[in-house]
Image: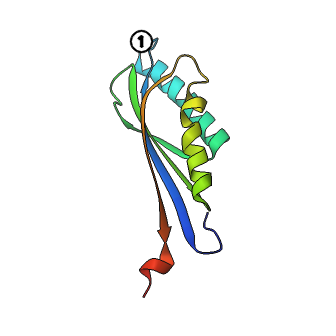
Amino acid sequence: MASDDGRLHFGVARVDVYLPGVDSLKAKRALLNRARAALQRDLAVSVAEVGDQDRWQRSVLGVAVAASSATGVDRVLDRITAVIERDPRVEVLRIHDLADVFDDAATTP
């Protein structure tokens, strides 16, 4: 969403997760699908598995959010770990995030 001043605030996060009890790719997909659904439902973000697709107990998720304010983006990025770890079978090992703003007025002559 863009605010009335034309600025689009956005954030992305790379989330490395560990799935200690998983013993198959099918079980991994089931856990990741639940985590993805929770993130989309609770935080209105886009989520994709972007790494470690072939490993049973590891995954890298990419999460993206857009908002009309920097505060809105920061609030969402700060809640990612808590939403994922509601399921005790999923552990966040590391999260790297980045927030920025796209201002069309600054790039238009």
Q: What x and y, as percent, mark residue 75? A: 61, 46
Regarding mark 1 in the picture, which secondary structure is present there?
loop
Q: Which one is nearer the viewer's eye here, 50 or 72? A: 72
Q: Residue at x 46, y 41 (%)?
A: 48
**Residue drawn at the location 46% of the way across and 49% of the way down:** 12
In the picture provided, is 61 more to the left or to the right than 67?
left
Residue 56, horizontal then vertical, whole percent: 38, 20
Name the residue beneath numbered marker 1: 23
Front-lying residue, 25 or 79: 79
Q: Point out residue 66 in the picture as x, y percentages from the top left corner.
A: 56, 56
Q: Position of residue 13 (x, y in %)?
A: 45, 43
Q: Residue at x 59, y 21 (%)?
A: 87
Q: Residue furthest front?
A: 71
Q: Quadrant of the N terminus?
A: bottom right
- Occupied quadrant, residue 62: top left
Q: Residue at x 45, y 19 (%)?
A: 19
Left or right: residue 19 compared with residue 87 = left
